[in-house]
Image (cartoon, rainbow, N blue to C red):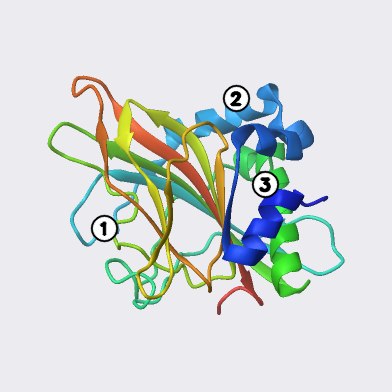
């Protein structure tokens, strides 16, 4: 894949970059066409409640999948369903335990939109850190909000994910206010704050260099459903964890 020169130069220089939804759709070729994206986006309506929130919250729904990529081998190979694990240093709220989330639907995992975004992220990871084996996790998130009950996209706060490259793509904002993406350095210095607003507006992160988080979300109209849907893809060098 040909890397988008502007965003990649920004990612290499600053540790983060933004790609507009229109640009992402163009980069995704067939995976960015309306007929491919419609069922992909619709799958966010079938996520399952995250039961591993130590704050007691029931405002997050998700599904996950994992993949591997080998140098010189095209594409990503899906691995067997496995738990998601983060060290406490990277997730003080929910880290330190195996979290078994619902598996991503087969059609979504094998579909052209996800394949195209993984190809872009892998090209970024290879360019930043060198071609090597990658362990990849794909996370579908829905954060729900209601009157008097905000949703917290990153309840653990501004953080590193403990990986090498992160791709965060907006899927939909429904009756929502808040949800600003925050990028900081390790000293807490604010590097950027912006809203991923349109479908496939994307943030790219060189995770060892920058921390990220998202501000709480709340409904614009308290009488209507409110949610924030995103896809998060991560690349970590090496084989899947034991």
Please give the name of the residue rendered at 56% of the width and 45% of the height, measured from the top-left corner.
Answer: 202
Give the percent coordinates (x, y) of residue 164: 59, 70
Which numbered disc flags the more N-terminal residue, 1 or 3?
1
The mark lying in front, picked from 1 and 3, is: 3
Classify mark 3: residues with Cα within 10 Å, few (<14), some (14-19) or many (20+): many
Classify mark 1: residues with Cα within 10 Å, few (<14), some (14-19) or many (20+): some
Say whether residue 44 is left or right of residue 206: left
* Numbered badge on residue 38: 2
Please give the name of the residue rendered at 32% of the width and 25% of the height, measured from the top-left corner.
Answer: 175
Residue for badge 1: 53
Which numbered disc flags the more N-terminal residue, 2 or 3?
2
- Compared to 194, does 200 lie above or below? above
Q: Are marks 1 and 3 in contact (CB under 8 Å)?
A: no
What secondary structure is found at the residue carrying circle 1? Answer: loop
What secondary structure is found at the residue carrying circle 2? Answer: helix
Which numbered disc flags the more N-terminal residue, 2 or 1?
2
The foreground one among 31 and 58 is 31
- Compared to 134, does 106 lie above or below? above
Give the percent coordinates (x, y) of residue 188: 35, 70
Mark 2 and mark 1: span between their CA atoms?
A: 30 Å
Residue for badge 3: 117
The foreground one among 108 and 202 is 202
* Numbered badge on residue 27: none
């Amino acid at each position: 894949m040909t890397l988008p020169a502007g965003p990649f130069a920004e990612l290499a220089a600053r540790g983060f970059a933004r790609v507009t939804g229109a640009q992402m759709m163009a980069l995704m070729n067939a995976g960015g066409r309306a007929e491919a994206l419609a069922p992909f986006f619709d799958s966010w309506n079938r996520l399952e409640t995250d039961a591993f929130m130590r704050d007691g919250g029931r405002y997050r729904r998700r599904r996950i999948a994992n993949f591997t990529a080998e140098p010189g081998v095209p594409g990503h190979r899906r691995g067997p369903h496995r738990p998601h694990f983060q060290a406490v240093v990277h997730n003080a709220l929910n880290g330190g335990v195996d979290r078994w989330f619902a598996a991503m639907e087969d059609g979504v995992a094998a579909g052209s939109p996800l394949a195209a975004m993984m190809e872009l992220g892998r090209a970024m990871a290879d360019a930043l850190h060198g071609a090597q084996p990658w362990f990849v996790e794909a996370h579908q998130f829905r954060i729900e909000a209601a009157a008097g009950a905000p949703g917290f996209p990153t309840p653990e706060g501004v953080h590193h994910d403990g990986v090498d490259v992160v791709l965060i793509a907006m899927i939909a904002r429904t009756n929502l206010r808040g949800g600003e993406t925050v990028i900081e350095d390790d000293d807490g210095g604010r590097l950027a704050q912006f809203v991923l607003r349109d479908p496939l507006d994307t943030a790219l992160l060189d995770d060892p260099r920058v921390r990220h988080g998202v501000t709480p979300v709340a409904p614009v109209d308290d009488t209507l459903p409110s949610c924030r849907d995103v896809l998060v893809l991560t690349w970590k060098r090496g084989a899947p964890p034991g």
